[in-house]
Image (cartoon, coloured by chain):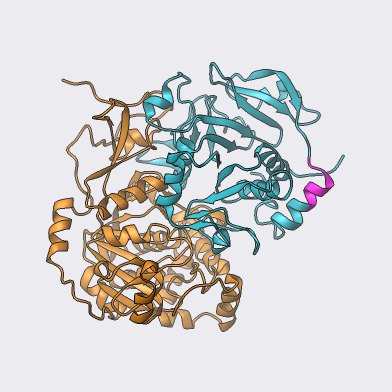
Chain colours: A orange, B cyan
Amino acid sequence: MKPKVRSKVRGVSNLKPDGIKKSGEQAFEWWGQSPEDARRLMVRKSRALVNKGVSLRAAIEKYIKDGINIGIGGFVNTRVPVAIVHEIIRKGAKDLTLSFQSSSICAELLAGAMLLYPDHLSIRRVEMAWWGYEVIGIAPLLRHLASDGMTQLDDYTNYGMSARFKAAAMGLEFIPVRDHGGSDMERVNRGKMVESPFTGKNTYLVPACYPDVGLLHVTAADIYGNCRIFGALCTCPEIAMAATHSIVTVERIISNESIRTFPNLTEIPYLAVDALIEQPFGAYPGICYGHYWFDMAHIQMFRSASDEFRKSGNQDLLKKYYEEYIFGCETFGDFLNKMPQETFEKIKQLDGGQPIILD
Amino acid sequence: MLAYTPLEMISYTGSRILEDNKIVFVGTGLPMIAAMHAQLTHAPGLGMIFEAGALSPVLDIGMPLSVGDTRACRKACYLKGLCAVFELTQRGFADYAFIGGAQIDMYGNVNSTFEGGSYIKPRTRFPGSGGAGAMAANCEKSIIIMALEKRRFVKKLDFLTSIGFGDGSSDYREKAGVMGSGPYRVITHEALFGFDEKNKGMTLLEVAPGKIPEKIQEKVSFALQVSTDLREMKTPTKEDLRLLREVCDPEGYFLSRKVE
């Protein structure tokens, strides 16, 4: 038998191999769609240039099912699909797989829903690079879930997760990357070290990630779902193209004429968008470049309720947040209406009016 | 002597290390402050990469609080997404990675994944690699910020998240399939470390005024090598402190934090 290809990482750290599931040691399993199934599903879809507008509730009802892989767009606090996540929590879904590079409030909101209402929503596993709040602090609910071994985590780098979505967007099975090798991620994640067929050099491959549903918030789009993104693109175009279905909230609907005047500005084509919802402040309390900055006070409020739960086990504050801001709201608009008007003036001002092209 | 805080000393030292007309891939917090200070003083041609997608922005509306922050995109030369900027590092366009973590070992490997327990049931789970693992692999040189404490400068990491020199063998990084040359400096407020060219072990290069190598060794769990050219760390001038406090981080988001 050919010896297994690997770097020299074994034994460098204290990491014990017990309990580590590795693709080389067991049959590989897709956590989302396989490339073949993803292709089959894509081929079947309509290409019609039609209005993709629906209500958020109808979109969630149609696409969010138990056991699916959900790709979360944005990056930490930037253009995060908060409105969509609220609606998913209202509906509930079991045995989800989450995939993202770096997430803050969206992943924490879903984790909190699982901890408070386990019969309503649950996360089976997460493929990710980073879960936290940057300047605001660590993610308390991740720490709680991980320490209890309640959810299986699969660790990559931010590039690794982005490249996995990119590989899926390219219709591939895997993609070679120049990272993970020589780190313990090589030992625990589902990537694999191989010999290059050309030079024999060690090359790390990560499997493509084909989510069933991608969740995205974008700057502007026409009614057909041609999306424009200003500010950092994060990994949104790749996630939209990788996912079988994409649910997109948009800050502002713009004209198709504008899209056709500047086609180079389209980052996600209409073909990759299944449901489009105009939702101003749809990333609140996160950032949407050119529209608003993040509301640190609101994030801190949710985070401290989460931290209280992690530290003391007392659910009251956290439950109050969900009851007031999610289950106590019919729509995301109801949630926004609970914030003082000054909040929106302030976060708009903090954006500084970054230039964006809307017409 | 001027009074400065440990975090100010770290930021100043980070700035001092960065050369003009190079590209530094920065994380949130002290790396950004160090890079901003360098741009304002000796390295006006230094460019920054922010991992959500920005290359060489002008940070003129305040310090970004996130690497995806609107402020990190401001007046950038090139603004795409994560794939684009990490591919810049693979291709050899990024000179420095500027990262942190919870633990470091003598070969500059860093842990930011978990501490205690096991991978599937960790005692303390950290946020994870984020960009750090990719930056340490493919930026040409890694600069690491760490608090000088025995529990952080460990013999063995609980998890190796960001690659350094691995086990110290000369072909470790080649066998790992990464492109960068590896760890370059480790910055603490009391000491600056480099790595021995031959054996790749962490080496004390500079100590803060009034410190001696023996006292630094007491805060490190592995045996340090000491440079034959050991120097005293430069300290920030009044003007450096003004820039750090009033220009780089006027709201004190990072510099006013208490050192844990």
Whether residue B130 is visible: no
Answer above or below: position of A213 versus A53.
above
Tell me what residue is drawn at x 27 percent, y 30 percent: A196
Whether residue A17 is visible: yes
Which residue of the protein is positioned furthest toward the front in this rendering?
A: A261
Tell me what residue is drawn at x 27 percent, y 57 percent: A242
Could you say which is closer to the camera, residue A252 or residue B154? A252
Instruction: Tell me the quadrant of the picture where the C terminus of chain A can be found.
Output: bottom left
In the displayed structure image, the side of residue A35 where residue A78 appears, left or right: right
Q: Quadrant of residue A211?
A: bottom left
Q: Quadrant of residue B231?
A: top right
Count of numbered tags: 0
Residues rendered magenta in the picture: B236-242
Residue B203 position within the rendered picture, expressed as x and y whole percent measured from the top left: 62, 22
Report if residue B239 lies within the magenta region: yes
Answer above or below: position of A231 versus B151.
below
Could you say which is closer to the camera, residue A75 or residue B46? B46
Give the overall secondary structure of the magenta segment: helix
Instruction: Tell me the quadrant of the picture where the N terminus of chain A can be found.
Output: top left
Residue B133 position within the rendered picture, expressed as x and y whole percent measured from the top left: 45, 40
In the displayed structure image, the side of residue A208 where residue A291 appears, left or right: right
Tell me what residue is drawn at x 23 percent, y 33 percent: A24
Could you say which is closer to the camera, residue B65 or residue B123? B65
Answer above or below: position of A119 versus A26.
below
In the displayed structure image, the side of residue A295 where residue A336 appears, left or right: left
Residue B106 position within the rendered picture, expressed as x and y whole percent measured from the top left: 55, 24
Answer above or below: position of B105 versus A326.
above
Tell me what residue is drawn at x 54 percent, y 28 percent: B154
Report if residue A172 lies within the magenta region: no
Residue B56 position within the rendered picture, expressed as x and y whole percent measured from the top left: 57, 53
